[in-house]
Amino acid sequence: MYKLEPAKRLLEKATGIGVPDKRRALSRVRSTKPTKITFKPDGYVPNNARVPLLLYRKAVVLDGDPAALLEAIFNANGWGEAWRNGIYDFVHYHPRIYEVLGVARGSATLRLGGNQGRTIKLKAGDVLVVPPGVGHECLEASPTFLAVGAYPPTGTYSECRGSYQEYLKTCALVRRVRPPTTDPLFG
């Protein structure tokens, strides 16, 4: 399935077929309050004690091509560089940028906040906004699981895996990241 998505995405970008327009995409976003979760540093993953991770349950009413819909929503709100895939099955974090993760299909159990973090189950239509430094990994996924990720225009993509050596270098980087100017769901 993951091998098909990049080709499908290229075809959608080239032809526009299956990609909802901005108005239609934004009409599929449900007005919902996020659950806010903060994570303290654990010595391996810096996490982000100042900025909460946002968990939006059933945030998007999915229809048509759910991955194209999520991409269109994120793009409409200024979050680009989108990808479609699963979520890595090892702890990782991005010390210099925020990340949004939308569940297009299936379900998955994630651990957030590193090895001592919190386990949550995500389903299609759920969206996470992950602040810089917050560790995340997929523990288990349904066979149909597909996530769409994207990034705000500010920040620099990089990826770390949660080692003591990285931790010492990245704590300062995490503190310097400015918040995005828009929310990936609500602008």
Image (spheres, rainbow, N blue to C red):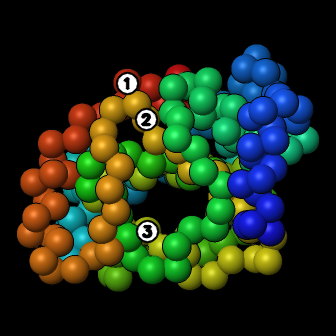
Which mark identifies residue 152?
Answer: 2
Estimate the x, y position of residue 122 in percent, counting from the top left.
65, 64
Q: Is the Cβ of the residue at disc 3 closer than 8 Å to that at disc 2?
A: no
- In terms of depth relative to the viewer, which is nearer, 165 or 127? 165
Measuring 38% from the left and 70% from the top, which residue is drawn there? 92
Q: Quick one: label 3 or label 2, which is nearer the N terminus?
A: 3
Three-letter amino acid code at disc 1?
A: Thr
Quadrant of the rendered structure where residue 17 is? top right
Measuring 66% from the left and 55% from the top, which residue is drawn there? 84
> Position of 60 compared to 136: left or right?
right
> Position of 75 compared to 39: left or right?
right
Residue lying at the far top in this picture: please name it: 23
**Residue matched to label 1:** 181
Measuring 12% from the left and 77% from the top, which residue is drawn there? 165
- In terms of depth relative to the viewer, which is nearer, 96 or 107? 96
Estimate the x, y position of residue 88 in percent, counting from the top left.
52, 73
Q: CA distance from mark 3 to mark 1?
A: 23 Å
> Position of 163 compared to 28: left or right?
left
Q: CA distance from mark 3 to mark 2?
A: 18 Å
Quadrant of the rendered structure where residue 108 is? bottom right
